Amino acid sequence: MYPEKLLAPGETIAFELKPHWRALFLPMLVLIAEVFIATWAFFTFDSTVFRWIVVAVGVFIVTWQVAIPFLRWLSTQYVFTSRRIIVRRGILTKQGRDMPLSKVNNVSFQVSVMGRILNYGSLEIESASDDGDLIINDVPNVEDIQRQVYELHELDDSRRRGRGTAPE
């Protein structure tokens, strides 16, 4: 949940997203394979030294191939507000990018074959600023999100021109 204290006065959160769960598929496979292989190796050999090596390698693999990707997924946040698009990433250090809706020129998406099956894709938001385009990968329901970003852009444009208000 994005902290509301970091929003500008009058700015509201329209919706928040995390990357699609498919980013966790490979770490889950690694974890399952490692549990079977490490258990087999641990109980097959009687050498205490070999067992400690199996445990050490297992901990290393779980840390780098399972825990870190999971924490990256968990700490990535896409927030769409009534005035901007916010992307935050990072486990120990944070990386962020904000794009005002007033600078959005075009919103497009790309969905691969696997994306069509699992319902995710990439969202590309073209900007009029010098910072370049914002590309968000692994967006669930990317076609719906594209439509909602267009709606937010139109509402923000109306608000800035004094013809309406942002959603509550």
Image (tube, rainbow, N blue to C red):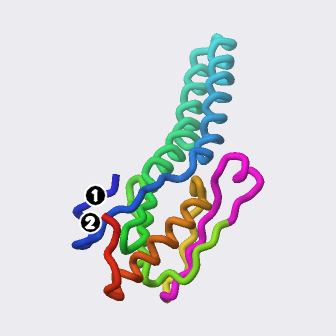
Position of residue 68 in the picture relative to residue 111 (left or right)? left
| Residue type at numbered disc 1 | Pro
The residue furthest right is 113
* Element assignment for label 2: helix
Seen in the image, is 78 located left or right of residue 161?
Answer: right
* Residue tagged 2: 6
Q: Residue 90's quadrant in the figure?
A: bottom left
Q: Secondary structure at mark 1?
A: loop
Position of 59 with respect to 39 (left or right) is left
Is 111 contained in the magenta span?
yes
| Residue that badge 1 annotates | 3
Q: CA distance from mark 2 to mark 1?
A: 6 Å
The C terminus sits in image quarter? bottom left
Q: Quadrant of residue 40?
A: top right
In the foreground, 6 or 56: 6
- Name the spot of residue 66 as percent of width and height, x first: 56, 39
| Relative depth, front residue between 166 and 48 | 166
Mark 1 crowdedness (10 Å alpha carbons): few <14, some 14-19, many ≥20: few
Residue 71: image x %, image y %?
46, 46
In the image, what residue occupies the spot 68% across and 29% down? Answer: 33
Task: Please give the range of residues in magenta.
Answer: 110-129
Which residue is located at x 60 percent, y 48 percent? 23
Residue 149, placed above or below residue 121:
below
Amino acid at circle 2: Leu
Q: Are marks 2 and 1 in contact (CB under 8 Å)?
A: yes
